[in-house]
Amino acid sequence: MTPPDSLNRILRWLLLALLFPLICLNGWLSFKVVQFFQPLVTSLMLAALLAFLLNTPVYFLQKQGLQRPWAAAIVAAIAGVTLGSLGLTLVPALSDDVREVVQLVPQWLDSASQQLASVENLAQHNRLPAGLSQVVAGLSDRLPQEIESFADEALALGLGAIGNISEALLTAVLTFYLLLDGDKIANGFFDRLPGKTGETVRQALQKNFQNYFLGQLALSALVGTLITITFLLLKVPYAMLFGLTVGVVSIIPFGDSVTFTLISLLLAAQNPWLGARVFVISLVIDQLIDQLITPRLLGRFTGLRPLWVLIALIVGTKIGGLLGLILAVPLSGFAKSLLDEWRIIPEGSETAEPDLTEEVASAELAQWRSP
């Protein structure tokens, strides 16, 4: 490496070191602004996400000859009727189950505590190592508290996501207006980006948001249906509630696995054999879907490793709550796609000789044809 190359590399690293504090400061300021305007930002982001997903059927109707206002109105009406019908049919049917489960959770936790205590007594009676006995004792003391704390946090998270009626109406109105003029706004933004950056950002958004969420919704419906049928066949109490919960949470990566594991633990507190069967069968179904259907349906949209997915989920939940948890993976995939497109070209690759095979072949063919 020549001295100028070494100097350029050092200067590049120094520039990155100077930019890093500025990026952190801008990120912290953005976080504070989002926190201050969180209700409005949440409604706007949720409306943008819904409009982004509903744009696919709107575009399909446009290709059939409908004007965009009519297509947007039809799609919005169908979506509203569908959500309203599901709310009117499922919410009353499941509300009683939810109240009963909330009342039964403390009893199940007490039963789990008793079973863990019996395991601890058995370990002490058989003179197992002190470390194992202490581990069992720690589980006996902390597991019920952790499960109860998780249930409280999940309930608070769900209630916070629902919000009030005014926020829901604001989200619906913003979604409809973004369906009407979203393409114009997006095209105006992308056209102002320099060079091919606009098209790159557009493709990255479509890859990591539209395709990702459509695939996740399809997988969620499939997982929820199969798990619900399985719970009904196994005669699991509150099978419909538990199955639909697994399906809804499966929109989030690893959400289905965590949810059916917790359900299995709760069921095992009353019936260990039922809890074990629920866990094993749910795990088999989940793995079959992950291995056979998910690669065909989703492919490798995000390209993120599991560790980065977990980090993105934690950071997204910390910043944006439930909405941040849902958007964490596609946002991270979007950032990765842009970095892959804009990565620094290795030195010397710009001066690589072009492939002249086609030009040489054309010249030889022209010379052969000439008299």
Image: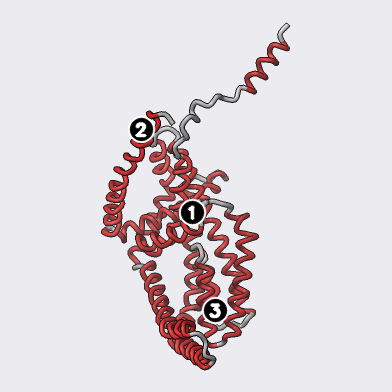
Where disc 2 sits, the SS reads: helix
Q: Is residue 365 above or below residue 194?
A: above
At mark 3, the secondary structure is helix
**Mark 3 = which residue?**
264
Q: Position of residue 310 (x, y in %)?
A: 46, 61
Q: Amino acid at mark 1?
A: Leu
Q: Nearer the viewer, residue 291 or 101?
A: 291
Which residue is found at the position 61% from the left and 22% from the top? 356
Marked residue nearer the N-terminal end (2 or 1)? 2
- The answer to which of marks 3 and 1 sits earlier in the sequence is 1
239 above or below 348?
A: below
Q: Which residue is mark 1?
A: 53
Mark number for residue 9?
A: none
> With 10 as the anchor, is 339 left or right in this view?
right
Q: Is residue 49 above or below residue 281?
A: above
Look at the numbered disc 1 and give the secondary structure of its residue.
Answer: helix
- The reply, left or right, for residue 174 in relation to residue 370 is left
Mark 1 and mark 2 in contact (Cβ < 8 Å)? no
User: Which residue occupies 63% across, 74% down?
Assistant: 281
Asked whether the viewer can see residue 101, the reply is no
Quadrant in which residue 159 is drawn = bottom left
Q: Which residue is mark 2?
A: 7
Q: Residue at x 44, y 86 (%)?
A: 137
What is the total number of numbered labels drawn onto the structure image?
A: 3
Asked whether disc 3 touches disc 2, contact meaning CB atoms under 8 Å apart, the reply is no
Split into 4 quadrants, where in the image is the N terminus?
top left
